[in-house]
Amino acid sequence: MPIRMIKSPFLLGQRHPRYTFAFVALVVCGYFFLVTAPPRPHSIVYKHSNELQARLDREERKYRTMLPQRHELVTKYGPSPSQVVMFPPDQDPWPAYTVWDFFPPIFNCPHELDRLGALGDGGKWICGASRIEDKPSCVIYSFGVDSTYSFEATLLQSTRFCELWIYDSTKGEDAASQMPRSVRHRVHFGKLALGAHDRHNEGDDPKTWTLKSLLAENGHSHIDFLRIDIEGWEWETLRAIVADFTVERATPPHAASADDDTAGAAGWHVREREGALPFGQLHIELHIWNQRFDDFLEWWELLEAAGLRPLHSEINTVYANYNRKSGVELAEYTFLNIRGENAFVKDYEPEHPSGDSPA
């Protein structure tokens, strides 16, 4: 039986010199690429942009102008917040409003506005996805997920460095199989719930973490994009987040009490707050089951006073279709955080180690 000889690449090069030259060129190019490639940046330096700041200032002036109009609408249909009905009955006199008309997302995104993920249920709106496309140390948190992960997967696929932390009290690491293989190395799963109080001892089920505790546990100080869909627990949870990261202004322009139906100089019934929330953008689904208008108004104004501005909303038409008698009770909002330093309201440049600059 004849013995088959394995051809060495060197023997092949002797017979075909052009292969030798090509191989050597490939090795040399690869070497110089590895040696001369700039190190991957791990942090950024924020810088001021007059153009971006001008767009934000314009939108903020417009938003502040809307606040007295909301108060007038409350007076018209209340006249106090406690007297406003979330969904007026279809009877005479027929008031032409629903609760969502009091909270329009009129703060325009200062960048591009995209809907990422699946058509229909599952897709989400994000302002300025390009701002984190190449951002080093990009962090995304997502609480409460469906079975498709279409939004999270699409967002990760459109970025280079973003890492995603997904949390759900009913799912664990086995959910990783739902993510595309190309991004699984940038995904972290945890079986827990987001809440207003920490309850994650051995006997607690489900284990509940506050956002403040999770950030400390993960070694994070900032989240670029935060997504929350926690089935009605968002009311107390967001109140806790605002309380954990901001404080009431010491000398408010008008210290309105809970029984005072007159909005203060800032246009809110709550005090303005100082400090910045630890995320650049928030996407949240609101479930207004059994909510009273005055409670909803106070909660919404608390977010506004902490620096959040709604830039897009989308009614959950799937839920509305199957629950036609109960009203349009679910809506998704995207908020921009206009305070502090984040990639959506500040320009930035990568900071390279040892003072190196990119090639």
Image (tube, rainbow, N blue to C red):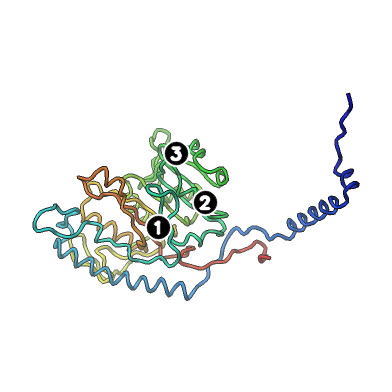
Verify CB contact (< 8 Å) between mark 2 and mark 3.
no
- Tag 1 secondary structure: helix
Identify the amino acid type marked 3: Lys
What is the distance, in whole Å, between disc 2 and disc 3 at their CAs? 20 Å
Identify the amino acid type marked 2: Leu
Vertical position of residue 41 compared to residue 227: above or below: below
Residue 140 location in percent, x, y? 48, 52
The disc label shown at residue 156, or none:
2
Which of pointers 2 and 3 lies earlier in the amino acid sequence? Answer: 2
What is the distance, in whole Å, between disc 1 and disc 3 at their CAs? 24 Å
Residue 335 versus residue 177: which sits nearer the camera? 177
Residue 336 placement, left or right of 291: right
What residue did someone put label 3 on? 191
The answer to whether residue 261 shows anywhere in this view is: yes
What residue did someone put label 1 on? 245
- Tag 2 secondary structure: helix
Residue 24 versus residue 7: which sits nearer the camera? 7
The quarter of the image holding the C terminus is bottom right
Count of numbered tags: 3
Residue at horizontal 76%, vertical 54%?
A: 30
The answer to whether residue 235 shows anywhere in this view is: no
Report crowding for label 2: few under 14, some 14 to 19, many 20 or more residues within 10 A (C-alpha): many
Residue 48 placement, left or right of 10: left
Indicate the quadrant where residue 303 lies.
Answer: bottom left
